[in-house]
Image (cartoon, coloured by chain):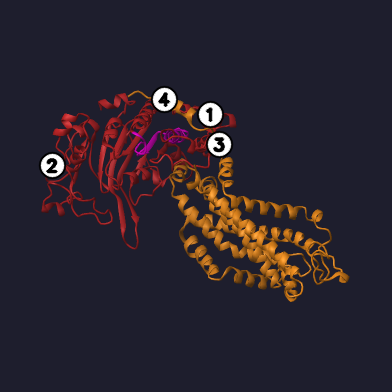
Chain colours: A orange, B red
Amino acid sequence: MSEAVTAEGSQTQTIRPRERRLAGFWRRFKRNRLALVGLVIVGIMLLTAALAPLIAPSDPQAQDYALTLQPPGVGGLMGTDSLGGDVFSRVVFGARISLISSLISVGIALLIGVPVGLTAGYFRGIWDEWIVMRVVDSLQAFPFLILALVIAAILGGGLGYAMIAIGIGFIPAFVRITRAQVLTVRSLDYVDAARAIGTGHVGIMLRHVLPNSLPPLLVQTTLAVGYAIIAEATLSFLGLGAEPGQPSWGSMLFQAQSYLTTAWWMAFFPGMAIFFAVLGFNLLGDGVREALDPRTYD
Amino acid sequence: MTRGAENGAPNGQALLQVKDLKKHFQVGRGTALKAVDGISLEIKKGETFGLVGESGCGKSTVGRTLVRLYEPSGGQVVYGGRDIHQAKGEEARILNRKMQMVFQDPQASLNPRMVVGDIVAEGIDIHGLAESRKERQDAVHELLETVGLNKEHANRYPHEFSGGQRQRIGVARALAVDPDFIVADEPVSALDVSIQAQVINLMKRLQRERDLTYLFISHDLSVVKYISDRVGVMYLGVMVEMAPSDELYANPMHPYTQALLSAVPVPDPDVEMERERIVLEGDVPSPVNPPSGCRFRTRCPYATEACAHEEPVWREVSPEHWVAACHCID
């Protein structure tokens, strides 16, 4: 038996050309029509938020008592509200508040949930079983919105506190998903190989465990952004989020309550904005999940 | 040790001593799975010690305990005069370099999100073995070439390689820290037979060139015979027989070893037709609750009632040939 290194070495030429991970991901992602729709919706929303001052015809906070409750067409593209504000301008600027508040609240959840879930799943023991998981269980015993509502009420009203409340409400889900993923990854051979080489706990967590736990987290993040938009709107609608004057979709709905029968456009347009934003992020999240699933590899 | 000469001459000096090693895993309240239950052996510098046995006999657990992935429940592993499981700090770091492991599943043992160059260089980074990026890169390229890959492979991901190539990457990673001793845990059992030979020959060449000592774990007796100087046979957490490879295959004494060896096919159809096989009945008993006395008695063709309370004695029946001796060995 002579060593046939060269025979196998030459085999590498026939392997398909190196494809970057991102390119493969994109190829699988774009096959999913709905995911592309989601991406387009989210893209439009991002652009709207970024270019709001250029798109909106007037100041979203401006009030004109001479022109209240004008229907669409007469008083601008989407009519005017009960204080004479331009609904279109407010919806456009609302995209900013929705996006910023949902990204910040999801950011809070990621920043706390991922490290906690990572250490709990990696080290196990008392920290995991008796502290982290029991706290997570107690938090998850409450429906998410109730929890966010209570936290927002305790902290006091205002958009900033609403973001924190929503963020805290998301933490349990992020801890659980991270931990579950870490539990699978930590028992794989490449983690043992790193231990045998002498890589420390921090190195193993950052180089091996976290990167391989990311796909479900990425999906959870996109879905959570959609959910945070609803949560922000709900809290604002209940008066615990944005101030009535601020152009938040939720507070616009709150303001529209008493005019539902007389001025449908006040509720309809911010409602549609919420609908499409959430739909967009959900479709995007589903698409990301499918594209990351190794079973759809080809 | 005639075989030793071709493998870089084991000089008879023990590199590693395993003394009454035990590893029990807790499986629920008060019950323990006795994966390894009192194993003693010596591995000499430069030799290949083969460890064989059925799935679940504890051979992988021995290997993992030897590279300190597991803490033993009892006994010790002595390397360079020191109990390796007591080592801390700098001493532990040195041991991490001196003792390495090659894993069974070449797919699972490589991080899919790291390029091969970074996988191989992990030990170099951790132990600060390269002064500069250039030095690190040169080291990686040299390692890849040593194991029969080429330097272009450094920028690729593990999924772009075949099973045999991945196992070569695993070998290169182990070599990166310049070890003396490598535990190879079923390194070829996930590979095609033709590729198995290549990887085994690679390992033999590296042993010669780098003066390595191997613990080679496998359930494939033909592979073990080909690579090993000495072989230990495990059954249900204990060693039942240990001898130089040629001696063991020519003159197996324990009924379990005889049964195992009779299952190895002979590459000659006439002999194969005539051959008598010892077929063991039943399954391996649970290591949570192993049989009393001799552990093999539930499947042993020669078992008597006495076997239930007579523990076999581990003794050297002829030079270097150890066996867990019961009434059927005189």
Disc 1 with disc 4 on a shared chain:
no
- Residue annotated with mark 4: A7
Q: Earlier in the sequence, mark 3 or mark 4?
A: 4
Which residue occupies 19% across, 38% down? Answer: B262
Would you identify the image quadrant in which residue B5 lies?
top left
Cα separation between marks 1 and 4: 17 Å
- Residue annotated with mark 3: A19
Q: Of all residues shown, which one is farthest toward the front?
A: A73
Q: Nearer the viewer, residue A99 or B49?
A: A99
Tell me which chain the residue with mark 2 is part of.
B
| Left/right of residue B124 with respect to residue B69 in the rendered view | right
Disc 1 with disc 3 on a shared chain:
no
| Magenta segment includes B185 | yes
* Front of the two marks 4 and 2: 4
The N terminus of chain B is located in which quarter? Answer: top left
What label sits on residue B329 in the rendered view? 2
Q: SS class of the residue under badge 4?
A: helix
Which residue occupies 38% across, 36% down? Answer: B182
Q: Of the residues shown, which amino acid type is indicated by label 2?
A: Ile
Identify the magenta region.
B166-192
Q: Earlier in the sequence, mark 2 or mark 1?
A: 1
Q: Is residue A102 above or below residue A288?
A: below
Would you identify the image quadrant in which residue A169 lies?
bottom right
Q: SS class of the residue under badge 1?
A: helix
Cα separation between marks 3 and 2: 61 Å
- Residue annotated with mark 1: B152
* Front of the two marks 1 and 4: 4
Q: Is residue B44 above or below residue A265?
A: above
Q: Of the residues shown, which amino acid type is indicated by label 4?
A: Ala
* Front of the two marks 2 and 1: 1
